[in-house]
């Protein structure tokens, strides 16, 4: 019976059992007629491929003929089996095979993955999707509430309320609401701008978090291995796990070798758990694979796993305080204390002057005349004085600094994502700008990671590559078979016929690491290896998986046809060679490895390495049954690793990335040392280092190139003495990389480290900036890193370095701009209050200045783009002050100019320009604001004299400056009562613009004044 007919028979059976007791006689006749038609079409469909359909009609009971509930095991049982690690319940359901059968899954071929994804969607409906309910992210209202928690804002609101009440009482609602209402409106604008800005950045962080959580998982569907998003995994999927992977869902061990997982994230236990089919087949979502490889059957996803429930209760809010934010908070606190002191002094002076009768109104009349002054007038004056003092505090406290950091970090994170770098920790953005040393891997970072076998040595003779590949016609068939067995069975990769090719096409798809894929491709295409047949003809007894410490992998298997047991090893050539005592030549003769032949093999390895080839050795040994033994408490079988016979040496070419030499030179030009740390042998490492520009031609390599073992065996004093000179470390282990990072940090370096393996995690965590690889990196490495380099390219690391410097530079620009306003505003208000008894800028005007500084200024300066000159400066390092002597020179000169101009206008403006007091106050306000707008241009370039360089590219900056200017015109010309201003004529506008424009030539001239590199002072804890 065909599958189509069988399926239709099941549907007919379902239809026949549908209830029809409640139908009327007429409806029953219709029901029977429909059944006849449907059954006829069902039988015909087995021959003509007609798909029966049921038309929607109100006369029949609806029956789902493709019921998703055909699974014979429910979710609660699956949860009980895995979460409770209940081996008895598992056995009751027929073990792993029984559960797979109940889930309609073939443990070898996976689930059916049809074009319409019907099977996947049905499983998602029945068992849920692999997502978890996230806590609601902070909405706009949250940030508004947070803004209202600012004590100065609350005091201003109280003052505004009192001013509004007394104003309406004295002047009526038509005229009396202006003062209080203006303060309310100004506070509302300030709060709205900062809240919206923070809300937008939080949304952006949420998006980046979603991207970082979207892990690509290897699984098998329709007998094809493929990568899918972790969110698309369903119950019944067969997932492939390897070292460094995160287990994506709860499941059961199907098959594999030496699988050990770290369950500390779930259980808190630090000991690694061995997973096997017999005693402990349970795999929990969120755990990490630390050794071995396996296939697992997914049994629970999303909220049905403990990991999903745990993650749903964890908020993804970015509350992390970066080191730069911590420094800026200290700076803000210090400046705030100064501002508060000035405000209190102004408050005391204004109260004394008012109550002693020294404060006069516009007409020269004393505002306070003892008992003659009404209570309402006294309260209005007191409220006005308090509002002025509080506003001085608002302006003095540079709360825009944290906002500027948030803005520039969010902006740079977004841009870095486009430049193939995903930031996982905010602090890395800024810390990267201080990096003095980059320790980089070779494979995939400096090279393309596109490996191909270009040389093969059999015995002491190389087989050269010709036009049609290598010539293997003269190789002994038995030796060729051994090589094929060693490649096919000792691998974590796979071979599949390309789905795009016809049966007669010779193209294949290869999976696994680049090295594995290169060897498999060579064996299949050149040696004509039939991998599936070889796997079926043998039974694997034990596997020793590859890791970066052993640098080799082994397999112990028994042939099914002759029952012989062989052990095959594959790995770093010089290491495997030491395990060999004999070798095969091309004619199948076995020869002993004596000192002469050993020397020739070592020369062959060095020759390949000097040609930038990765050299891999293949070896085997026949194992007698009496030698098969288990060791340890678990009686684990051992793969014999001595007395091997060398089968051949494979040379794999991995070309350098285009442009990597330019990128390395850019780092060196920027004062950043580049060190290459690789597991390859010293000759390959040197060849690549010369090619990439890490080593210069004719450079003496005695002190700069070293092997990991030698570095490891140095005393601590020797390591500290030599670590800065080392440029290349070959045959290094993850521990050697960690040692180097620790030594460099102790020498005062800010260290960035790349890593892709599970064992790189300690070095990635120890480094100031951990850079994991997005393509080759394991999930453990990514989780331990600060930034993920999505394309594994060293040039992207250089881009990250530039962005780090850009973040730091943008913050310094804003600090210079902000402190100029702070210093000028505080000095002007203090001198005016002490000498004249009033402040020249009202509460509303100061709040407007605060808005220009804190929000619009931060947005303009914090989003400046990358410039090439960022790489012309030496690294910032750990100890340089945040406010440099150059910044002090720039801000003091601008602040002094503003103070002189505004105080001149305050005391002599009316007589110089022949204007009224109201117009003069407007001139002061307008000039002060325009000075800040013009000074924003000066702040763009801390050192360069041409502040307009690249201005046409900074469209956001120009837009914000233009928007600020338009708002200022509206404030002065159209919001007279709100801003307490008078309209100005074109001549008065020209005066204000002229005064403000002078800040440009001043900025140019002061940059001619040289400054010392030695920090000017260590005040306000500017240093870390």
Image: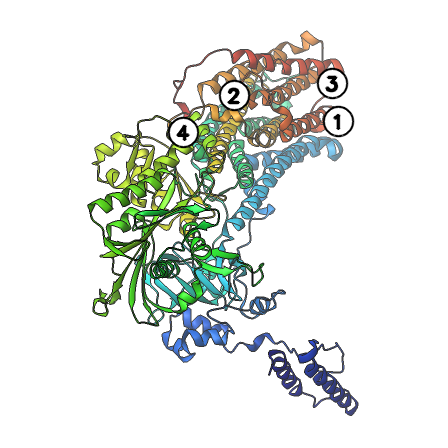
* Quadrant in which residue 875 is drawn: top left
* Quadrant in which residue 500 is drawn: bottom right
Contact check, label 4 and label 1, Cβ < 8 Å: no
Q: Secondary structure at mark 2?
A: loop
Distance between the Cα atoms at labels 4 and 3?
Answer: 55 Å
Q: Nearer the viewer, residue 912 or 646?
A: 646
| Residue identified by numbered label 1 | 974
Distance between the Cα atoms at labels 3 and 2?
Answer: 34 Å
Mark earlier in primary sequence (2, 1): 2
Q: Secondary structure at mark 4?
A: loop
Contact check, label 2 and label 1, Cβ < 8 Å: no
The residue depicted at 46 percent of the width and 28 percent of the height is: 666
Mark toward the viewer: 2 or 4: 4
Mark 3 crowdedness (10 Å alpha carbons): few <14, some 14-19, many ≥20:
some
- Locate residue 870, reporting x and y percent: 50, 26
Report whether 935 appears left or right of 809: right
Mark earlier in primary sequence (4, 1): 4
| Residue identified by numbered label 4 | 672
Q: Nearer the viewer, residue 164 or 106?
A: 106
Q: Nearer the viewer, residue 36 or 210?
A: 36
Mark earlier in primary sequence (4, 3): 4
Image position of 240 with respect to 159: above or below: below
Distance between the Cα atoms at labels 2 and 4?
Answer: 22 Å
Contact check, label 3 and label 2, Cβ < 8 Å: no
Image position of 737 with respect to 339: above or below: below
Mark 4 crowdedness (10 Å alpha carbons): few <14, some 14-19, many ≥20:
many
Mark toward the viewer: 4 or 3: 4
| Residue identified by numbered label 3 | 984
| Residue identified by numbered label 2 | 942
């Amino acid at each position: 019976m065909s599958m189509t007919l069988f399926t239709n028979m099941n549907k007919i059976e379902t239809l026949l059992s549908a209830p029809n007791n409640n139908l009327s006689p007429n409806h029953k006749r219709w029901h029977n007629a429909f059944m006849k038609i449907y059954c006829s079409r069902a039988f015909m469909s087995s021959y003509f491929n007609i798909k029966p359909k049921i038309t929607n009609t109100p006369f029949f009971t609806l029956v789902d003929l493709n019921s998703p509930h055909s699974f014979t095991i429910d979710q609660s049982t699956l949860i009980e089996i895995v979460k409770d690690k209940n081996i008895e319940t598992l056995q009751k359901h027929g073990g792993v095979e029984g559960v797979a059968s109940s889930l309609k899954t073939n443990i070898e071929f996976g689930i059916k993955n049809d074009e319409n994804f019907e099977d996947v969607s049905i499983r998602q409906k029945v068992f849920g999707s692999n997502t978890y309910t996230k806590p609601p992210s902070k909405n706009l209202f949250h940030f508004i509430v947070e803004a209202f928690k600012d004590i100065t804002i609350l005091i201003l609101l109280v003052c505004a309320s009192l001013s509004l009440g007394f104003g309406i009482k004295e002047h009526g609602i038509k005229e009396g609401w202006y003062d209080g209402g203006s303060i309310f409106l100004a506070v509302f604008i300030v709060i709205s701008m900062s809240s919206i800005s923070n809300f937008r950045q939080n949304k952006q962080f949420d998006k980046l978090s979603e991207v970082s959580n979207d892990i690509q998982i290897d699984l098998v569907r329709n007998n094809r291995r493929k990568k899918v998003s972790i969110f698309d995994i369903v119950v019944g999927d067969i997932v492939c796990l390897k070292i460094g992977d995160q287990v994506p869902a709860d499941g059961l061990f199907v098959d594999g070798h030496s699988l050990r997982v770290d369950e500390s994230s779930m259980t808190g236990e630090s000991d690694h758990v061995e997973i096997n089919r017999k005693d402990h087949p349970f795999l929990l979502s969120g755990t990490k694979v630390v050794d071995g490889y396996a296939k697992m059957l997914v049994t629970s996803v999303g909220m049905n796993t403990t990991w999903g429930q745990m993650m749903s209760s964890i908020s993804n809010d970015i509350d992390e305080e970066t080191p730069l934010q911590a420094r800026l908070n200290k700076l803000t606190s210090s400046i705030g204390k100064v501002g508060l002191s000035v405000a209190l002094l102004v408050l005391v002076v204004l109260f004394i002057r008012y109550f002693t009768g020294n404060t006069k109104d516009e007409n020269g009349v004393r505002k306070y005349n003892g008992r003659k002054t009404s209570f309402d007038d006294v309260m209005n004056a007191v409220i006005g004085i308090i509002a002025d003092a509080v506003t001085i505090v608002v302006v003095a406290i540079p709360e825009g600094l944290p906002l500027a950091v948030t803005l520039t970090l969010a902006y740079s994170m977004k841009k870095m994502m486009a430049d193939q770098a995903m930031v996982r920790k905010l602090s890395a953005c800024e810390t990267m700008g201080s990096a003095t040393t980059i320790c980089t891997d070779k494979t995939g970072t400096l090279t393309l990671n596109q490996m191909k076998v270009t040389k093969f040595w059999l015995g002491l003779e190389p087989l050269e590559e010709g036009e049609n590949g290598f010539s293997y016609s003269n190789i002994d068939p038995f030796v060729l078979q051994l090589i094929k067995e060693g490649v096919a069975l000792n691998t974590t990769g796979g071979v599949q016929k390309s789905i795009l090719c016809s049966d007669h096409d010779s193209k294949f798809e290869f999976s696994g690491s680049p090295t594995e894929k290169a060897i498999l491709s060579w064996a299949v295409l050149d040696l004509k290896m039939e991998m599936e047949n070889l796997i079926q003809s043998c039974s694997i007894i034990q596997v020793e998986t590859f890791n970066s410490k052993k640098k080799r992998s082994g397999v112990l298997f028994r042939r099914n046809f002759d029952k012989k047991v062989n052990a095959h090893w594959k790995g770093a050539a010089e290491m495997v060679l030491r395990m060999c005592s004999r070798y095969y030549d091309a004619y199948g003769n076995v020869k002993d490895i004596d000192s002469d032949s050993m020397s020739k093999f070592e020369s062959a390895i060095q020759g390949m390495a000097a040609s930038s080839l990765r050299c891999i050795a293949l070896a085997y040994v026949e194992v007698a049954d009496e030698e098969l033994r288990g060791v340890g408490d678990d009686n684990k079988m051992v793969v014999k690793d001595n007395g091997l016979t060398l089968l051949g040496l494979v040379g794999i070419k991995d070309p350098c990335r285009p442009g990597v030499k330019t990128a390395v030179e850019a780092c060196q030009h920027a004062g950043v040392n580049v060190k290459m740390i690789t597991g390859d042998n010293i000759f390959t490492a040197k060849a690549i280092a010369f090619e990439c520009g890490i080593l210069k031609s004719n450079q003496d390599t005695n002190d700069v190139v070293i092997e990991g073992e030698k570095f490891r065996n140095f005393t601590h004093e020797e390591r500290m003495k030599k670590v800065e000179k080392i440029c290349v470390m070959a045959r290094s282990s993850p521990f050697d990389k960690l040692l180097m990072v620790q030594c460099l940090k102790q020498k005062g370096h800010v260290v960035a480290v790349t890593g892709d393996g599970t064992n790189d995690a300690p070095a990635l965590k120890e480094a100031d900036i951990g850079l994991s690889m997005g393509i080759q990196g394991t999930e453990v490495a990514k989780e331990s890193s600060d930034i993920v380099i999505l394309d594994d390219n060293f040039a992207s690391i250089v881009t990250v370095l530039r962005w780090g410097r850009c973040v730091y530079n943008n913050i310094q620009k804003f600090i210079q701009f902000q402190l100029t306003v702070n210093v000028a505003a505080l000095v002007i208000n203090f001198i005016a209050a002490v000498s004249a008894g009033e402040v020249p800028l009202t509460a509303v005007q100061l709040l407007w200045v605060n808005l220009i500084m804190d929000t619009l200024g931060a947005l303009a300066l914090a989003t400046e783009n990358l410039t090439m000159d960022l790489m012309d400066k030496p690294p910032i390092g750990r100890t340089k002050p945040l406010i440099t002597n150059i910044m002090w020179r720039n801000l003091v000169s601008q602040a002094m100019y503003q103070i002189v101009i505004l105080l001149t206008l305050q005391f002599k403006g009316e007589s110089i320009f022949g204007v009224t007091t109201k117009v003069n106050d407007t001139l002061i306000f307008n000039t002060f604001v325009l000075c800040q707008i013009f000074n924003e241009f000066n702040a763009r370039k801390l050192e360069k004299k041409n502040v307009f360089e690249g201005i046409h590219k900074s469209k956001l900056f120009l837009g914000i400056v233009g928007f600020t200017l338009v708002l200022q015109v509206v404030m002065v010309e159209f919001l007279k009562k709100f801003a307490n201003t008078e309209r100005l004529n074109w001549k008065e506008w020209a005066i204000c613009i002229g005064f403000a424009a002078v800040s440009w030539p001043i900025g140019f001239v002061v940059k001619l004044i040289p400054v010392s590199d030695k920090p000017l002072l260590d005040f306000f804890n500017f240093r870390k």
